[in-house]
């Protein structure tokens, strides 16, 4: 793929997650300022912007990971399929089964490859027998393009895999609970170019099943893998739209300055 080749696929148009007036405070620090965004189903949405601009903070709002930070407060409304994810009745653990997360550094559990993938289905009671669990593990590893490399070593520790394989194992672990949305926080920043290309190819396949949201510091990566791009700057969502348009004809001068390398 060319460095700045842009995926231009037709939108499905169906909104999976909707954010309105989202604000995040860390103590007295106002980290996110009134963000409105619609995240479409079966689409890769990229969050781009300089370091510290709020893109990862906002990503963590989408599966309530900020709940785990004592000083964090989130205001506004975020819905998944029209339901408020911050409603007190919503169990964050169940929410995170529906809105999976893949982190910057591959973080397999210190367990076997099999147990890494089986962990979520076990705690959420998604299988009733060993045979069903075997099936989920195989299907998840296939979806993460890791089955062929892992099928003969399922009982070996996940930490024994290469970095790129570990990240694909973490993707398999995230999809094993049958999520609807997959969040990825700079999933390739710790990987070499070959492993990065494999994960990018995988992201393109995953969007046929899930809504994928990726935070990336690489504009080239955003241009390659996403159909929609959101540009964050100083805690604000400056611009959001079709990836092709954001990269070639942005509406806001700050977006243009970032893309041409004048700010960042």
Image (cartoon, helix red, strand yellow):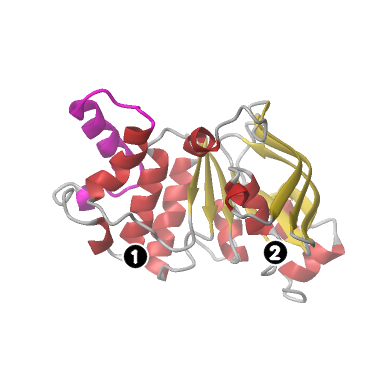
Neighbour class for label 2 at 10 Å: few (<14), some, many (≥20)?
many
- Viewer-closest of 111 and 1: 111
Q: Is residue 5 left or right of residue 15?
A: left
Residue 41: image tag: none
Which residue range is magenta in the image? 124-150
Q: Is residue 182 visible?
A: yes
Rendering coords of residue 81 (x, y %): 63, 27
Task: Say which element carries label 1.
Answer: helix
**Residue 142 shown in magenta:** yes
Residue at the image position 53 percent from the left and 61 percent from the top? 186
Secondary element at image label 2: loop
Residue 195 placed where, x, y %?
A: 38, 63
Magenta-span inclusion, residue 228: no
Identify the residue position indicated by label 1 in the image.
163
Name the magenta segment's main secondary structure. Answer: helix
- Taking the spot 16% from the left edge, 49% from the top edge, the residue there is 155
Is 217 positioned to the left or the right of 115 in the image? right
> Where does residue 69 sit, x and y in percent of width and height?
61, 55
In the image, farthest residue toward the top:
128
How many marks overall? 2
Residue placed most toward the observer, 211 or 3: 211
- Gap in Å between the C-alphas at discs 2 and 1? 25 Å
Judge from the rendering whether residue 63 lies leftward or rightward of residue 204; answer left or right.
right
Q: Earlier in the sequence, mark 2 or mark 1?
A: 2
**Pointer 1: residues within 10 angstroms few (<14), some, or many (20+)?**
some
Disc on res. 49: 2
């Amino acid at each position: 793929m060319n460095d700045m080749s842009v995926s231009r696929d037709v939108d499905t148009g169906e909104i999976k997650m909707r954010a309105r007036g989202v604000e995040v405070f860390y103590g007295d620090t106002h980290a996110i300022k009134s963000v409105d965004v619609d995240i479409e189903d079966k689409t890769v949405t990229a969050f781009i912007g300089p370091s510290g601009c709020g893109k990862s903070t906002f990503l963590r709002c989408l599966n309530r990971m900020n709940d785990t930070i004592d000083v964090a407060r989130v205001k506004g409304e975020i819905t998944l399929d029209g339901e408020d994810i911050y409603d007190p009745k919503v169990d964050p653990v169940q929410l995170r089964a529906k809105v999976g997360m893949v982190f910057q550094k591959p973080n397999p559990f210190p367990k076997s490859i099999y147990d890494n993938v089986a962990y979520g289905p076990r705690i959420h009671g998604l299988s009733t027998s060993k045979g069903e669990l075997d099936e989920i593990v195989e299907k998840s590893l296939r979806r993460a393009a890791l089955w062929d490399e892992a099928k003969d070593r399922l009982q070996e520790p996940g930490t024994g895999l290469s970095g790129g394989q570990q990240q694909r194992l973490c993707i398999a672990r995230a999809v094993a609970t049958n999520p609807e949305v997959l969040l990825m926080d700079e999933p390739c920043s710790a990987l070499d170019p070959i492993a990065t290309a494999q994960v990018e190819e995988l992201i393109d396949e995953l969007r046929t099943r899930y809504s994928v949201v990726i935070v990336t510091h690489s504009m080239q990566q955003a241009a390659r893998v996403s159909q929609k791009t959101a540009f964050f700057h100083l805690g604000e969502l400056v611009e959001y739209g079709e990836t092709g348009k954001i990269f070639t004809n942005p509406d806001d001068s700050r977006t243009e300055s970032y893309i041409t390398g004048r700010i960042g």
